[in-house]
Image (tube, grey):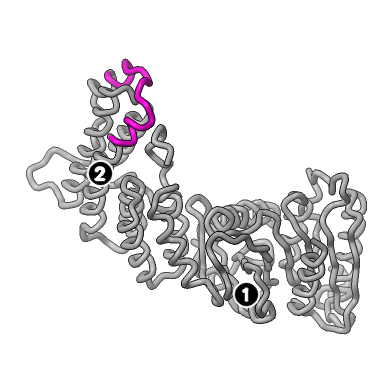
């Protein structure tokens, strides 16, 4: 862990700022007392930093204490401003370990104060801060057990990403990785990052082992938004292949954002993404955040395979066109294309871009028109437009294949495409 920057940015969704500041009154609440004790532990560390030539980590701890409702202290601020950055990394690390344990214990006490259900994110954030200050193996295991016991899988998903972020390079990270490995190997586990609200179902191959690298298939369902069911069918078709499956809960795949399709997203988030362009931006950033976690902790390769059924094609084309260097291959399955990703696209590059297979169905009821509406072009004309866009941007490894199928995600054919690309390595 880099001790020069001791304080992580506040984890999205787990706010540290308390709505109840510490106030001078005789009958202070338990939460206020616990906040004050935690803030004092942070300020003690900040003072040590000022006295030992480590002003930057000291300022970070001071800001964290202020977020808990305590005054910064003019004297401490002056000491930090006057201090030069002279401490060695080893010296700061020794000091941080000593103070970090005390800070973590104070956060532990604060996290367990009785609170309303509406404040669960704030108090979960205190647990994550405790892990950040003391990223030990024992604390990591304890937090992993607590996350595993959460009934709300959407809440637990974001706790996983938050715990990895809090653990950093500490020993605690292994416990979170072990939890994911146990829950996601041969099954589906919902995972979210610490800094983006998108969540995704992740399935590790049955033979997953720490230390190995694995290809990744990102698969997106269509307008029905049956993300979990889509993921289960895809992983069933995966069989024994050593490939990680990632099935994100995207927004660009559907029409109206109906709340029941997105039980793990707030209504505010859905309302903010009514238009398709913002949805695509949201999806790309969110999927990339989850993929970064899997690359760092679960051995996922950085270049991923993409597939999207029907409306899921919107994201598939978006990522392919915007980030071709991060794509191992793309295979839209009866996928929609509305031009998303074309604007500002970097082009395929000198190698002609990754291999692309455009799958469509001969018996697709939406082949020529969407839902029979002659004013709404169907999959065939949309795929033709995608071909033209790919050619214009220099993609030369593109094949279009018509199958004797209806409107289908074509899981078996998708995995055959993945095999064909991996076989050429």
In this view, 27 is above or below 49? below
The magenta region covers 79-94
Whether residue 413 is visible to the viewer of this picture, yes or no, is yes
User: Which of the two discs, 1 and 2, sits closer to the camera?
Assistant: 2
Quarter that holds the N terminus? top left
Kindly identify the residue that appears in the image at 74 percent across and 67 percent down: 307
Disc 1 element: helix
Quarter that holds the C terminus? bottom right
**Alpha-carbon distance for marks 1 and 2?**
41 Å
Kindly identify the residue that appears in the image at 88 percent across and 72 percent down: 374
Disc 2 element: helix
Where residue 300 appears, as percent x and y from the top left, is 61, 59
Residue 92: within the magenta? yes
Where residue 46 appears, as percent x and y from the top left, is 28, 30
Which residue matches tag 1?
231
Q: Most prominent secondary structure in the magenta stretch?
A: helix
Which residue matches tag 2?
103
Give the class, few, some or many, for how many residues have Cα within 10 Å of label 1's Cα (few <14, many ≥20).
Answer: many
415 horizontally vs 395: left or right: left
Where residue 64 appears, as percent x and y from the top left, is 32, 38
257 horizontally vs 331: left or right: left
Toward the left, the furthest residue is 26
In this view, 79 is above or below 48? above
- Quarter of image, res 248: bottom right
- Near-viewer residue (125 or 281): 125
- Near-viewer residue (174 or 16): 174
Residue 44: within the magenta? no
Indicate which disc, 1 or 2, sits on the residue closer to the N terminus.
2
């Amino acid at each position: 862990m880099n001790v020069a920057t001791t304080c992580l940015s506040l984890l999205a969704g787990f706010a540290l700022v308390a709505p109840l500041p510490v106030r001078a009154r005789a009958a202070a609440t338990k939460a206020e007392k616990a906040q004050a004790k935690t803030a004092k532990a942070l300020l003690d560390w900040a003072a040590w930093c000022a006295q030992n030539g480590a002003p930057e980590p000291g300022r970070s701890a001071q800001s964290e204490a202020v977020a808990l409702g305590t005054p910064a202290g003019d004297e401490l601020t002056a000491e930090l401003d006057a201090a030069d950055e002279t401490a060695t990394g080893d010296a700061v690390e020794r000091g941080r370990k000593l103070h970090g344990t005390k800070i973590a214990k104070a956060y532990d006490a604060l996290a367990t104060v009785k609170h309303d259900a509406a404040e669960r994110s704030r108090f979960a954030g205190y647990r994550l801060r405790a892990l950040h200050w003391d990223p030990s193996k024992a604390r990591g295991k304890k937090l992993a057990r607590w996350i595993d016991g959460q009934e709300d899988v959407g809440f637990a998903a974001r706790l996983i990403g938050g715990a990895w972020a809090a653990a950093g390079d500490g020993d605690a990270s292994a416990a979170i990785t072990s939890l994911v490995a146990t829950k996601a190997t041969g099954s589906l586990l919902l995972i979210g990052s610490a800094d983006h609200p998108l969540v995704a179902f992740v399935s590790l191959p049955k033979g997953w082992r720490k230390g190995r690298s694995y290809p990744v298939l990102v698969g997106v369902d269509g307008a029905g938004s049956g993300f979990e069911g889509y993921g289960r069918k895809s992983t069933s078709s995966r069989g024994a292949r050593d490939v990680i499956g990632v099935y994100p809960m995207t927004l660009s795949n559907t029409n109206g954002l109906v709340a029941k399709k997105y039980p793990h997203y707030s209504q505010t988030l859905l309302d903010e993404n009514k238009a398709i362009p913002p949805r695509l931006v949201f999806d790309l950033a969110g999927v990339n955040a989850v993929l970064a976690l899997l690359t760092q902790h679960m051995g996922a390769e950085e270049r991923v395979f993409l597939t999207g059924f029907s409306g899921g094609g919107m994201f598939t084309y978006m990522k392919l066109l915007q980030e071709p260097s991060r794509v191992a291959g793309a295979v839209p399955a009866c996928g929609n294309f509305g031009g998303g990703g074309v604007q500002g696209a970097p082009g395929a590059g000198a190698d002609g871009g990754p291999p692309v297979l455009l799958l469509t169905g001969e018996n697709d009821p939406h082949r020529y028109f969407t839902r029979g509406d002659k004013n709404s072009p169907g999959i065939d004309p949309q795929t033709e437009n995608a071909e033209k866009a790919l050619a214009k941007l220099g993609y030369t490894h593109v094949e279009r294949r018509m199958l004797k199928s209806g409107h289908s995600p074509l899981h078996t054919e998708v995995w055959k495409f993945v095999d064909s690309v991996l076989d050429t390595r």
